[in-house]
Amino acid sequence: MAHRIYVYNIDSQTGDRYSHYLGEWNYEIPELLFPLFSCDPRSKGKLLYFDKINGVARLKSFFQLIGEHYQLLYKKAYYEPVNKMFDLLDALPYDTFLVDAWDVFNMNEESHTSQAKDWVLEIKEKSKLYDRAIAKGNLGWLEKEIFAGRGYETFLAMLETDWIDYGLGYWNEELYKNPLDIFEENNLCGLKDKKGNIIIPAIYDEIFAFTDEGIAVIKKDGKFGYMRNDGKVLVECIYDEAYDNLFIHDKAYAIIEVDHKCGLIDIISGAIVIPCEYDELELLWYTGIFNAKKEERYRVIDVSGKQVIADLSESPFDHDYNNLIYRKQEGTSKRAFYTFNGTFIGEYPEDVLSAVSNGFYFAKPNKFQKKTEIIKPDGTLLDTDIDTLMMDVSDYGYTSFAYRKGKEWHIYNTERNEFMLKGYTIQNIHRDHYTKFMTDVFVISDENGWGIYNASEDRWLIPISKEYKKIECCREEIFRVLTSGGMHYYDQKTEILSDLYDYIGEGVDYYEQKVALYKGNNMFILDNEKIMHQVTDRQLGAFYEKRYNLRGKDQKYFLDFYKAWIERKGSNYEEYFDDKTLMSRAEEYSKEGNIKETIRLYTIGVKRGNADMMVELGYIYTNEDQPEFYDVKKGIALYEKAASQDNGIAWNNLGYHYQNGIGYPHDIKKALKCFRKGIELGEGLAMQNMGLLYFYGDYVLQDYDLALEYYKQAEKKFYFNEDKISEIYYQKRDFENLQRYLKKDKVNTYSNIYYGIMYEEGLGVKQSTKKAIKHFEKALEYSTYHHALQRVLYYYKEDPAFANPEKYEYWKSYGKENDMGV
């Protein structure tokens, strides 16, 4: 279940809240609406507050940019919902948005107040991206920043998602479906527009909630009527009681009462279509079937008042989801069942009847009958004492069904109302997972062989023949037909019976392939578009990677075929692999520690000109931990070759070698040039390495702002440097952002030393020596921080409030053991 945030409109001075909530969203503020919440974000306790007026203006600028970028401004599908959204936002009466994220905050053990503060900082930082995009008119740049690693790739894809409806779908539909709001004055009700203007004065005793059709029950002087959501009175207040409207056959009806008797009114015309003569009147089914009680008996009537079922009942009729109506009977668990047109089907227990098609039903075995029986639309029995019914609840659209009685099978067509294959004794009908999706198609076998019969068309698709030893379905619409000499496939849709193959089985990739076919030394694929392809040598290796998608005989045949292919190709069979498979196999060898085979396979890729494999082979040759294969000259040559193909990792690695003087003379200018080229190509490791240079000030002037910029870029590529970013914020005295990054340290590797200093000096937190000591000790559990050791030794020896000789000696010994100059 998704956790949600809730949005409201409030008055920042009085705290008054708009009557409707504005929206509820999963986990976060939607990317499309983010500018709306970018103005003056602030938190108070667990709640977040935003400037509504400037936020709406900024969102309009953002949607203008989207509309221009995707040329949507003059398309009705765009401007109608967008204009409606901005109309509702402009009409909101108060100056502030309030966001309550308690449900999301509950996912984290951290206090809600602390999480709210952190979220404000994140919103401020993310808002800069939107501001930059709006200022420069560059939506493409923003999309790359926002959607990296997420489900959507563009704002257009998000806009065109059905439920989002160009942004309108995010909002509570009550805000725009009903243009007016109910208000009370002197205990009477009226209607106001969203800006508070009175449209209908407070003259009604009550105005009930508007339904989805925009109709409300109204009450005046003790009588009831109906009003539309624009204030128009549809039915004057003249009835003793009135109930919410019923939408039947695209018309609005409602149950009303006069002198304690119920009837039905057509709200738009005002005509009473069912007279007010019933003690009870209740909608039984949405198509306009009603339970009506009169003279202590219930009857079923339609929207015109006509009695549908001849029988009466002492208790209300009910319905089940097989489009049947039933009434209970005293002294038995059987129910009397009827169709919606009033035909009596029979008496059965609940949950026994199921629909077949065209008004036919079958009754499962139950305590009153041992075997299945089939009921015709007129309520008479088609057949009884049925042993097996070949019918499934998922068999939608079937016009035929098969059943076995005794030793014989029968096929019945519900459209023709007749048995098929009359005069032919059906010995066996076969069904599996796939055949049930083939409407009205049956695989039949007897002593004369196998065949496929279409019952809806009354014809054999494949006439029964002794030549066919077995027919089975291997995918939707596709059968494999076994003969003594091999296999054919039969396509039920195209009615093509293929040439003979040695073997036919499921495709290796279910989502792209119908079947795999084998003939001699060749393998073929019938894809989902029914196009035949011969499998190339390069494809075969990739198929082998997916071999576990196959099962049983299909998997065994493929593996035997693959083994024979390897024997034909010889020891260097991997040369026939595609690059992806070749690289995958090389990585497997590397994990196994078989570096010679890894080099052999990467070398094949290098000869093909594959830059990724050049880089991987370069790693091996420049790895000093593997002296047997170390050859830095070869490694750098490979990096240079890959870099010439704009491989970002190769450029990064060249930068590393220039920086450290390994294989190249030390040259920081060339190192920076290489790193920048890697960054230009989107390589996160190059971003991280540039951050490191400016962070430490190695070979360049130390620049925390530049380091932070590169680290933030690297984060988006999933290279995380929270400890370095924390140090930057500490040095910049930005304790709010520092705390954000300290909270990312879930395993306490770097955060405690900062917490110790902050609590000791009261930097961004309330000063607490006790907490400072606690964090200094935790920091020392992880690493030998000299400052932390000095502070705990001071407190345990010099500070009267915390002096503790035993702990002092413990930490003093710790310092000596770790050569910390104690």
Image (spheres, rainbow, N blue to C red):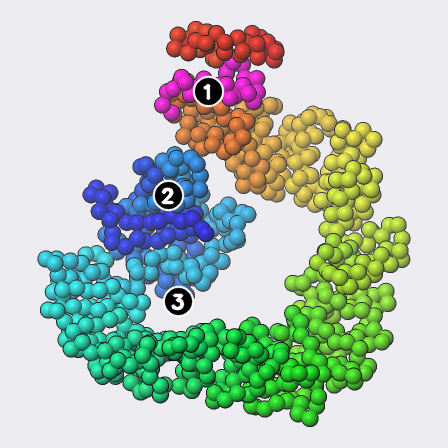
Query: Mark 3 or mark 2, which is nearer the start of the sequence?
Result: 3
Quadrant containing the C terminus in the rendered view? top right
- Structural crowding at the residue carrying mark 3, measured as other residues with C-alpha within 10 Å and reported as few (<14), some (14–19) or many (≥20): few
Residue 76, numbered label: 3
Image: magenta residue range: 765-789
Q: Which mark is residue 118?
A: none
Residue type pointed to by label 3 = Lys
Labels 3, 1: front one: 1
The residue beneath circle 2 is 102
Q: Position of residue 255 (x, y in %)?
A: 25, 75
3D distance between C-alphas at marks 3 and 1: 63 Å
- Residue 225, image quadrant: bottom left
Q: Which residue is mark 1?
A: 774
Question: Residue type at mark 2?
Answer: Trp
For marks 2 and 3, give the CA distance: 38 Å
* Element class at badge 3: helix
Secondary structure category for the residue under label 2: helix
Q: Secondary structure at mark 1?
A: helix
